């Protein structure tokens, strides 16, 4: 019995030894293959960095404000007897927009004018009597005062009638009217918004450190869609002399010609202020930048030596300092020299020393003023 068990144990140990030897051989082969394995090149696009000249600019977010804007309201209570404008129409300064019923005031005016005529006749008669010394000076003064009171009363009623007509205080564009024919208005009831849109203001704030670079008369560009579409060009007309104590920003106001009405009150626009002379920069596509919390970088394509000493086309990560952006491009202030080849796509897959294969058949956008197809 013991002999049989010994034979079985010997057989099991022999099988385990054979299996272990086979596995050992497999691992050795895998290790050898791993040492000789190299990752295939990563497909990227590239561009040769070149020096460009960009105008110095300062960007901010601005708010469009009307030079003149108000919501017209009723000055006196009354019933609307006529509406002389359409919503969204252009009106001239002084144009009558809404007229309130003034029949009662006109009747009062007729009565006051009759009283004025009587007071005038009494004044003329009293003047002749005073010249002939037939009345005392005190009696004439009382007659003259009654005439002045009657005249003032007429002017008062005329002013009330004029206030029953709501007129445009300046030329502009009306909004949606808020009153209807026959409606009773109380004093202060809104009638219609009125905005002057040409010229128009754009207000924006800049940090206190940069306000010294601004000056009245500097050119300002207002853009929509993240700065891709320029809609107007104006000039700085006012710089607030006081720094906001909460934000440490300074308010700046620019005035724009707006004949087409592209800028509307309440809009937010990207404002770019042109500063000084042009400065040399290296402009690269935005897609070439590898953005990261620890620093922005690009990948320089150059000849790299592998562990075996053989050269191949690889990349080197280079940290850069970014400047302003324009359209598809961003300015590199420091880190890239003209003439260096930079990867412009697939950068999220790269690491220092990685092999690359450049295929520029289709390249990412690289225009300072792109024009989208649906713009």
Image (cartoon, rainbow, N blue to C red):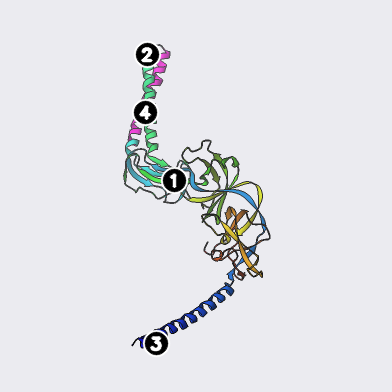
Q: Could you tell me if the residues under marks 2 and 4 are in contact, i.e. CB atoms within 8 Å?
A: no
Residue name at image x 46 percent, y 39 percent: 246
Q: Is residue 126 left or right of residue 312?
A: left
Q: Is residue 28 left or right of residue 114?
A: right
Q: Which residue is mark 3?
A: 7
Q: Secondary structure at mark 4?
A: helix
Q: Nearer the viewer, mark 2 or mark 3?
A: 3
Question: Which numbered disc covers residue 194?
Answer: 1
* Residue 76 image-quadrant placement: top left
Q: From mark 1 to mark 4, how far is it between C-alphas?
A: 33 Å
Mark 2 or 4, nearer chain start: 2
Q: Secondary structure at mark 1?
A: strand
Q: Nearer the viewer, mark 2 or mark 4?
A: 4
Question: Which numbered disc covers residue 138?
Answer: 2
Mark 1 or 3, nearer chain start: 3
Residue 117 visible in this rendered orientation of the protein: no
Q: Which residue is mark 4?
A: 153
Q: Could you tell me if the residues under marks 2 and 3 are in contact, i.e. CB atoms within 8 Å?
A: no
Residue name at image x 38 percent, y 20 percent: 145
């Amino acid at each position: 019995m013991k002999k049989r068990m010994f034979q079985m144990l010997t057989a099991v140990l022999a099988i385990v030894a054979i299996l272990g030897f086979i596995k050992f051989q497999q691992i050795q082969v895998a290790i050898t293959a791993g040492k000789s394995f190299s990752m295939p090149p990563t497909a990227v696009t590239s561009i040769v960095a070149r020096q460009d000249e960009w105008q110095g600019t300062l960007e901010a977010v601005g708010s469009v404000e009307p030079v003149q804007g108000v919501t017209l309201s009723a000055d006196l209570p009354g019933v609307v007897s006529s509406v002389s404008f359409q919503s969204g129409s252009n009106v001239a300064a002084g144009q009558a927009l809404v007229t309130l019923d003034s029949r009662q005031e006109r009747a009062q005016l007729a009565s006051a004018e009759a009283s004025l005529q009587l007071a005038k006749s009494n004044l003329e008669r009293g003047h002749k009597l005073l010249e002939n010394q037939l009345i005392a000076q005190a009696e004439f003064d009382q007659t003259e005062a009654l005439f002045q009171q009657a005249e003032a009363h007429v002017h008062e009623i005329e002013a009330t009638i004029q206030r029953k007509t709501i007129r445009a205080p300046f030329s502009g564009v009306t909004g949606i009217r808020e009153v209807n024919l026959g409606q009773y208005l109380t004093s202060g009831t809104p009638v219609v918004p009125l905005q002057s849109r040409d010229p128009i203001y754009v207000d924006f704030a800049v940090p206190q450190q940069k306000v010294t670079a601004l000056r009245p008369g500097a050119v300002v560009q207002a853009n929509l869609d993240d700065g891709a579409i320029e809609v107007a060009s104006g000039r700085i007309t006012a710089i607030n002399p006081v720094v906001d104590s909460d934000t440490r920003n300074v308010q700046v106001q620019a005035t724009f010609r707006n004949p087409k009405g592209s800028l509307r009150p309440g809009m937010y626009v990207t404002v770019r202020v042109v500063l000084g002379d042009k400065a040399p920069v290296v402009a690269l596509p935005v897609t070439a930048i590898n953005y990261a919390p620890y620093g922005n970088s690009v990948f320089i394509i150059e000849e790299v030596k592998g562990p075996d000493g053989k050269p191949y086309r690889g990349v080197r990560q280079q940290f850069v300092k970014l400047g302003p952006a324009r359209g598809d491009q961003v300015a590199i202030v420091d880190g890239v020299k003209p003439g260096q080849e930079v990867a412009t796509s697939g950068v999220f897959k790269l690491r220092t020393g990685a092999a690359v294969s450049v295929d520029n058949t289709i390249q990412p956008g690289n225009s300072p003023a792109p024009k989208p197809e649906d713009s």
